[in-house]
């Protein structure tokens, strides 16, 4: 299904044009990867403890025992290091000594997640709603947020970077779609994310596709979704962001087309959302790659994309001028992993023509290649089956643009070594979605700590 991307592809896009789209002070992807130190395979503690072939989503007695053991051991390990050597569970010992906070990922994976998955087995979206409600409630409790932050957030100068003129405390972000309406932003900060992309938001509030519309594929550590941009609309998001900001991390805003609006009127629809939200976003993502809004992916084609990006960039310039801003806020384009090489090059050329600040690669895929699970559900596939393809697309874009165009790499990043490989492929920043569902809140800390260690 995917076009093969050859390393020696010569469909070159002029580097100079991309240089126009970037700002001074920005570090090149190579520089960013360099900041992480030499390439090495990163091992994350919770990954080491994962039980091979154990179906995700089942509560096992062994799992519970392991979690409790880790919890106990973590308590005493600082005073009784020999306990670790004497323990019969080597995996657990390694993880506990590796990271003192590992018992939480263990608790999540062996107790919380199985229970949550089982309770919401008929509609996976309920789990998402419950978690988001919990995080929303937490967002109103500053003392708890402070505690969470002490526990989860990794603050280290080695993780900081500046990309398209925006400073990021760490390079790991929450991908679009998780917190579409920006209801739990303080909680994401407390969990240690370096940035959050809210949305995709549309000008008109809309309910999305009929439920069920999210499906878990535990054996593949994947999700299939056909949400269809369910959201409260751009104005509601603007009101919420006004009440929530400022935050200590950048906020990206993903813009999409309202379902009721025909393709011919898409430009005005995107522009209306941009206008309503401009004051609140540190960057804006033009989502033309969701597979769940009929016709949306056609906006990736040269003719449509040209019109759309020209209008949005004009709008951004006008808004920046009105607000007295020296630099217009960065506009990025999010592309699908299903594009052929030539279609990617076309999108890159149009992006360069309009001075786009970066590319987000990739959205979910329509491909079902490499799945162990048989599923007839329609929608976009995310998670582990997407890892290699997303990285391939990032590498291709980086090569085509001579490493001059910032890339946010997203798709199947589940471990620190996935993130590192994405940086090696040319990404300046990375995002996660599906692995957060499977690994839980410890994921961010685990990846950031491993990136720090690699940078030592
Ligand atoms: C349930 C669900 C909803 C999503 N909604 C959006 C969305 O509204 N806008 C968007 O740009 N991407 C959306 N995505 C795609 C993710 O942002 C991400 O690009 C994709 O899932 C690949 O990353 P992952 O493998 O880490 O999940 C969604 C993904 C999932 C699983």
Image (cartoon, rainbow, N blue to C red):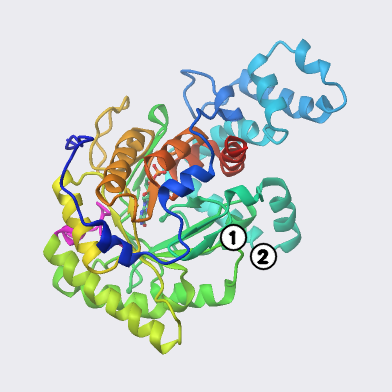
Taking depth in this image into account, of 166 and 337 the one nearest to the observer is: 166
Q: Secondary structure at mark 1?
A: helix
In which quadrant of the rendered view does residue 194 lie? bottom right
Taking depth in this image into account, of 371 and 11 the one nearest to the observer is: 11
Q: Is residue 261 visible?
A: no
Q: Residue at x 63, y 30 (%)?
A: 106
In the displayed structure, would residue 252 be above or below residue 174? below
Residue labelled with disc 2: 140
Taking depth in this image into account, of 132 and 314 the one nearest to the observer is: 314
Q: Is residue 1 visible?
A: yes
The quadrant of the picture occupied by the N terminus is: top left
Which numbered tag is attached to residue 136? 1
Residue 204: percent from the left, percent from the top?
32, 73
Residue 189: percent from the left, percent from the top?
61, 57
Q: Residue at x 55, y 23 (%)?
A: 50
Label 1 to label 2: alpha-carbon separation: 7 Å
Q: Residues within 10 Å of mark 1 (few under 14, many from 20)?
A: some
In the displayed structure, would residue 73 be above or below residue 454? above
Question: Is label 1 in contact with label 2 (beta carbons under 8 Å)?
Answer: yes
Q: Residue furthest left?
A: 303
Q: Residue furthest front?
A: 16
The quadrant of the picture occupied by the C terminus is: top right
In the displayed structure, would residue 228 be above or below residue 152? below
Residue 113: percent from the left, percent from the top?
55, 36
Q: Secondary structure at mark 2?
A: loop
Residue 269: percent from the left, percent from the top?
26, 75
13 drawn magenta: no
Taking depth in this image into account, of 217 and 32 the one nearest to the observer is: 32
Q: Which contiguous range is marked in magenta?
A: 286-301
Which numbered tag is attached to residue 284? none
């Amino acid at each position: 299904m995917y076009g093969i991307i050859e390393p020696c592809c010569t469909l070159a896009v002029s580097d100079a044009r991309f240089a126009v789209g970037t700002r001074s002070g920005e570090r090149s992807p190579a520089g960013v990867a360099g900041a992480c130190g030499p390439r090495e395979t990163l091992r994350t503690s919770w990954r080491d403890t994962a039980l091979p072939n154990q179906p995700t989503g089942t509560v096992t007695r062994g799992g519970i025992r392991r979690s409790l053991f880790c919890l106990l051991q973590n308590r005493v390990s600082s005073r009784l290091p020999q306990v670790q050597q004497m323990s019969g569970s080597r995996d657990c010992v390694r993880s506990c000594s590796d990271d003192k906070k590992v018992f939480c990922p263990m608790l999540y994976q062996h107790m919380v997640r199985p229970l949550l998955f089982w309770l919401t087995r008929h509609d996976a979206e309920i789990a998402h709603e419950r978690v988001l409600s919990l995080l929303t409630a937490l967002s109103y409790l500053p003392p708890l947020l402070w505690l969470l932050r002490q526990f989860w957030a990794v603050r280290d100068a080695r993780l900081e970077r500046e990309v398209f003129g925006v400073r990021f405390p760490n390079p790991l972000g929450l991908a679009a779609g998780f917190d579409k309406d920006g209801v739990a932003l303080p909680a994401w900060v407390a969990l240690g994310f370096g940035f959050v992309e809210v949305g995709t938001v549309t000008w008109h509030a809309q309910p999305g596709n009929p439920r069920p519309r999210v499906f878990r594929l535990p054996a593949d550590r994947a999700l299939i979704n056909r949400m269809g941009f369910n959201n409260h609309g751009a104005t509601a998001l603007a009101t919420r962001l006004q009440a929530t900001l400022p935050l200590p991390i950048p906020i990206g805003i993903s813009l999409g087309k309202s379902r009721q609006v025909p393709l011919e009127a898409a430009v005005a629809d995107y522009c209306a959302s941009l206008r309503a939200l401009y004051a609140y976003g540190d960057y804006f993502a033009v989502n033309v790659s969701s597979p769940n809004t009929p016709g949306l992916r056609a906006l990736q084609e040269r003719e449509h994309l040209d019109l759309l990006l020209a209008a949005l960039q004009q709008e951004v310039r006008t808004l920046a001028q009105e607000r007295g801003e020296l630099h217009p806020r960065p506009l990025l384009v999010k592309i699908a992993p299903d594009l052929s090489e030539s279609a990617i090059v076309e999108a890159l050329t149009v992006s360069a023509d309009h001075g786009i600040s970066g590319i987000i690669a990739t959205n979910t895929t329509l491909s079902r290649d490499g799945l162990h699970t048989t599923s007839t559900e329609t929608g976009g596939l995310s998670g582990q089956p997407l890892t290699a393809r997303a990285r391939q697309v990032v590498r291709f874009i980086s090569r085509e643009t001579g490493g001059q165009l910032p890339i946010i790499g997203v798709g199947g990043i589940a471990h620190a070594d996935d993130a590192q490989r994405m940086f090696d492929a040319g990404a300046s920043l990375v995002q996660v979605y599906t692995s957060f569902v499977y690994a839980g809140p410890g994921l961010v800390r685990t990846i950031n700590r491993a990136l720090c260690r690699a940078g030592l």
